[in-house]
Image (spheres, rainbow, N blue to C red):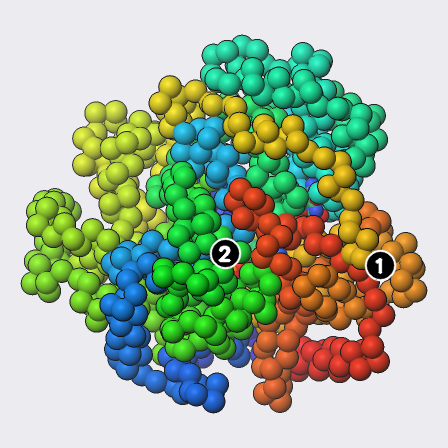
Amino acid sequence: MSSPELDWRPSACNLCYINCGIEVGVDCSGPTERIVKIRGDKAHPRSQGYLCNKAAAIPGYVHHADRLTTPLRRRADGGFDAIGWDVAITEIAARLGAVQQAHGGASLALYGGGGQGNHAGGAYATALLRGLGSRNTFNALSQEKTGDFWVNGHLFGSQTCHTAEDIAHCDLLFVLGANPWVAHGFTNARDELNTIRKDPGRRLIVVDPRRSETAQVADLHLAVRPGGDAFLLGALLAILQRRGAFDADFLAARTTGADDVLATLQAVPVDAWVAAAGVPMAQVEQAADMVQAATAMVVRAELGIQQGLNSTLNSYLEKLLFLLTGHFGKPGTNTLHSWLQPLWGNARGQRFAPTGTEVIGGLLPPNAFADAVLADHPARLRAVWVDSSNPVNTTADTPRLKQALAALDLLVVVDVAFTETAALAHYVLPASSQYEKCEFTLFNFDAPHNVFHVRAPVLAPLPGTLPEPQIYSRLAHALGLMPPQAALDDLAAAAQAGPQAFAKAFGAFSAQHVDAGPVMAIVLHDTLGPTLPHGNAAAAPLWAAAHRLARTQAAAVQRALHAPADTPPAQLGQKLFDALVQGRSGTVFSVHDDPWGLLETPDRRVHLAIPALLQALGALDVASLQPPADFPLVLSAGQRRMFNANQILRAPAFRQRDLDGALTLHPQDLAAVGAGDGDWLALVSARGRLVVRAKADDTMRPGHLALPHGYGQAHPGPDGQRLVCGPAVNALTSSAWCDPVAGTPFHKHVPVRLEQPTAAEVAAADQLAQQLRHAVAA
Ligand SMILES: Nc1nc2c(c(=O)[nH]1)N[C@H]1C(S)=C(S)[C@@H](COP(=O)(O)OP(=O)(O)OC[C@H]3O[C@@H](n4cnc5c(=O)[nH]c(N)nc54)[C@H](O)[C@@H]3O)O[C@H]1N2
Ligand SMILES: Nc1nc2c(c(=O)[nH]1)N[C@H]1C(S)=C(S)[C@@H](COP(=O)(O)OP(=O)(O)OC[C@H]3O[C@@H](n4cnc5c(=O)[nH]c(N)nc54)[C@H](O)[C@@H]3O)O[C@H]1N2
Ligand code: SF4
Ligand SMILES: [Mo]
């Protein structure tokens, strides 16, 4: 039988935050259309047809046995009843309203607000939250990036000033605690790494305790002791300073505060710190040589330092490396990028009352969530909805997180699948998948060309599901948060009449309904949305964003759209919006020639001195790297591997090459515990115990172990029983083990020990492993 002819439709991959342009091959021959194949979209201006191995798994995200197809309401016995959408919306609205009435808006929170491919819904979830009088948003970014944002706020004047990496044009790529070969993190990573490797004029340095896939193609691999990065970076900066390698002209022309930084570096005990970092001095000198020789360097950092010891300090030192050497704001260096719509905000100095936690970028750290619910505080959280997140598996300290979820008056989960978090909710609302609705992401971190991709739906919504904008619109209407229907009808009629009529009517509407500000995304969706092409109603809030950018960054938008310099702002904004909603493969929305107009310090200089972090650098103590006696090994709890993708892919088939989510460790560590390759071991932290499959791996540094991220999901097996695939790593982590500034967890540095499992543990692990293999084979 010949395979059916496929209809190819443009979209983007939702499996990591690069969001490569793809074409999905849709089989239209059956009663319902199905995605069966994926290929790269050559028309996508950023990825240009590139794909990694994971994209082939997208059909398994859309079509699998655990998709939700009806709203669910939990019964007293813990089971669920299927209920209709009208009942679900009415009941949830009533209960949210009751909590808000009794305890105020501050008792409500949103947890999530967008995974790796879906930020459209976040605009609407946030609108509902604001409409109810709350700004409490817990987001995964505060498990990794808020230390970086905090540093950016100090250096560049706003936490929304975010650095981009012009890797395509650098001659030195300095990778710190990142494994782009596997995890990407920048566009077309494997192609870029191969190009650098083959070019004798370009160099790659990797700092990673593990000889990672990226380290294996590097010119220099510094196998740092886990957690030793602040010492290594401090020593490297001090060496560069002593060699006179800093860019004095750049520092004088573009920065303030360099003297304070230099004074701190002067005091660094280089030899002691290099020894603490566990790297030969000759290699650090070699790294310094390569930095000095570079004409254009990019520093690329990720979780290895952001979820490692001293994470906010690491983010500072990493930026000092490119700033003090003047590799900033030029082709082939780190620079700032523009936003169509910032993914986070600027919130310097704000505190969250129930826990005293600093709000960074407008976001709260998941590490503070359990305390925020369980605290004895008048503003403690009582009602929460989770959207596009699975905190039971992804937030530190699973048992305590579950305790907090159970203490809520109301927990609503909006997801495409029946997650571990959904299983604990009062109500579960089934969302349409990212290929069944209009989507976009705000992960647009490129410079000088920045790209935004509005992804039109390529399939009809799975019956029973709704796109998030409709869910939040229905809730906002049911809660009485929306302006009068007659006003919305007038605005909708103006939208039908055309862009100019709409712009005029919207101006009048905004003036008249000032209190509709918080729910404006929903207003735009309900009125302008229906007029947009390709089913792109959810992109309506971008109308306001496009007009704002055309006003504030006119030259960059003109360059992107090839529009004449005298284009009036209103016309430029409309042109940008039209390009965004009409384009199917992504749109270049801004082209910047330098970052200085994007800086938000009043003097447009980089403010290099951050006193609290300079003090922390001066106070670094080599003894802090000594592991506790009862937990002598360091676990990287959540490694990116070829076959994991956060919690997005639930069916075990995707992970069949590493079905048990093995613990990788150096053969020497395996021998020390008297075990062999493939044996079960008990991995014990101060917080918990997991039985895991051991896998000898000589790329690991002795003493350093790794468990994968993105496991621990239950999925229905062939006999209907729910089988949990691989370790749920956050059973081992603690929410208190985190950065003092940003509250980001030290997941790359969990102190552990290995033990022999009991006979009963081994029997249970063997049985589950067999069931999983049986399920995958079926
Ligand atoms: N395949 C795959 N790709 C993904 C994801 C996925 O789940 N799977 N998730 C996406 C997401 S959400 C993110 S945030 C990114 C994360 O992307 P990365 O941060 O690149 O990935 P990780 O594997 O978490 O960690 C990177 C490296 O840090 C190293 N490391 C551990 N401890 C230390 C240390 O003390 N110092 C230093 N210098 N390095 C250390 C590890 O050995 C590892 O090689 O990946 C994205 N891409
Ligand atoms: N121990 C440890 N913990 C970690 C990490 C680690 O390295 N170690 N990494 C951290 C990092 S960097 C990150 S980014 C977080 C990620 O953790 P989370 O914030 O929990 O996000 P994801 O794992 O991406 O889960 C995405 C969820 O969105 C759902 N989903 C997919 N599409 C849609 C949709 O269209 N609509 C809706 N409503 N839902 C959808 C998926 O089914 C899934 O449940 O994990 C963090 N946790
Ligand atoms: S790098 Fe791979 S997982 Fe990430 S978006 Fe591209 S194809 Fe998808
Ligand atoms: Mo992440």
Quadrant for residue 642, please give it: bottom right
Residue at the spot 32% in from the left edge and 46% down from the top edge: 580
Say which element carries label 1: strand
Q: How many marks?
A: 2
Quadrant for residue 241, please give it: top right
Residue 158 lies, with reference to residue 527, above or below; the image says: above
| Amino acid type shown at disc 1 | Ala
Residue at the spot 69% in from the left edge and 66% down from the top edge: 688
| Residue on which the image places disc 1 | 696
Label 1 CB, ligand 1: below 8 Å?
no
Q: Is residue 245 left or right of residue 371?
A: right
Residue 374: give x, y in percent of width and height: 47, 65
| Residue on which the image places disc 2 | 368
Quadrant for residue 753, please give it: bottom right
Residue 372: give x, y in percent of width and height: 45, 60
**In this rendering, which labeled residue sits more in front, label 2 or label 1?**
2
Residue at the spot 31% in from the left edge and 30% down from the top edge: 553
Residue 546 lies, with reference to residue 478, above or below; the image says: above
Quadrant placement of the C terminus? bottom right
Residue 24: give x, y in percent of width and height: 48, 61
